[in-house]
Image: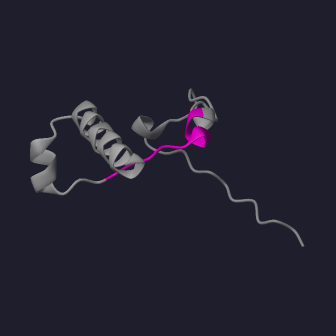
């Protein structure tokens, strides 16, 4: 069975990806990321990811201390 070779039509100039590098971010993407979507009321309390991480680490330490008892 022959594959249908589609002819690429030139797109608009602002969509020209020819100078791009294929797979540039592939390694970083493969490492994986964790994304948590915060509700708006929670996001007001935490101005950035550093504040979220500090708070979560405190909770983890508290729970670990409680479990050790």
Please state the extent of the stretch shown in magenta in the rendering: 28-36
Q: Position of residue 20 (x, y in %)?
A: 56, 29
Rendered-image quadrant of the N terminus: bottom right
- Residue depicted at 61% across the width and 37% down the height: 26
Closer to us: 55 or 21 = 55
Closer to us: 33 or 52 = 52
Instruction: Specify the farthest residue to the right.
Output: 1
Closer to us: 20 or 39 = 39
Closer to us: 3 or 25 = 25
- Residue depicted at 48% across the width and 43% down the height: 33
Q: Position of residue 31 (x, y in %)?
A: 59, 39
- Residue depicted at 34% across the width and 39% down the height: 61
In this image, 4 relative to 19: left or right? right
Res. 39 image quadrant: bottom left
Q: Position of residue 16 (x, y in %)?
A: 49, 36
- Total label count? 0
In this image, 31 relative to 14: left or right? right
In this image, 45 relative to 51: left or right? left
Q: Is residue 61 magenta-colored?
A: no
Q: Position of residue 40 (x, y in %)?
A: 13, 55
Instruction: Specify the farthest residue to the front.
Output: 69
């Amino acid at each position: 069975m022959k594959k249908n070779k589609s002819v690429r039509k030139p797109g608009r100039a602002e969509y020209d990806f020819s100078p791009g590098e294929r797979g540039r971010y592939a390694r970083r993407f493969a490492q994986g990321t964790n994304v948590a979507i915060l509700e708006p009321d929670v996001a007001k309390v935490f101005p950035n990811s550093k504040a979220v991480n500090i708070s979560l680490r405190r909770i983890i330490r508290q729970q670990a201390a409680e479990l050790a008892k």
